[in-house]
Image (cartoon, rainbow, N blue to C red):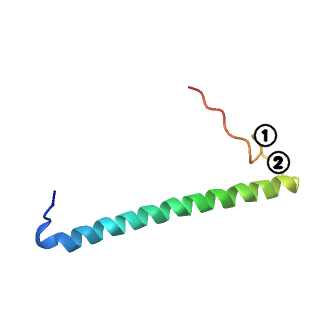
Amino acid sequence: MTISLGPYASFIVTSYAAAAIVVALLIGWVIIDYRNQTARLRELERSGVTRRSGRSAVDTPKTTI
């Protein structure tokens, strides 16, 4: 099964590739930032700073179903 994109094939493929790269970069950025923030919270808790919510950085929120 071959799909013909016509004379705009290169533009369409490039656009989809660029969108996929941007989404992948954003996902990577969020993952890296989450790890950095969690590490920073652990650092603060080790130094004696406490959170008002009373949870530690490694606690996971309880989910209700």
Q: Residue furthest right?
A: 48
Q: Disc 1 vs disc 2: Cβ atoms closer than 8 Å?
A: yes
Mark 2: amino acid: Thr
Q: CA separation, marks 1 and 2?
A: 7 Å
Tag 2's secondary structure? loop
Give the quarter of the figure containing the N terminus: bottom left
The percent coordinates of residue 24 (x first, y second) are 45, 62
* Occupied quadrant, residue 22: bottom left
The percent coordinates of residue 58 (x first, y second) are 74, 46
The percent coordinates of residue 18 (x first, y second) are 35, 69
Q: Would residue 9 appear left or right of 45 to someone viewing this image?
A: left
Q: Would residue 8 appear left or right of 36 to someone viewing this image?
A: left
Looking at the image, residue 7 lies above or below residue 50: below
Q: Residue at x 78, y 46 (%)?
A: 51
Q: Residue at x 18, y 70 (%)?
A: 9
Mark 1: amino acid: Gly
Looking at the image, residue 53 lies above or below residue 30: above
Q: Which residue is mark 2?
A: 50
Disc number at residue 54? 1
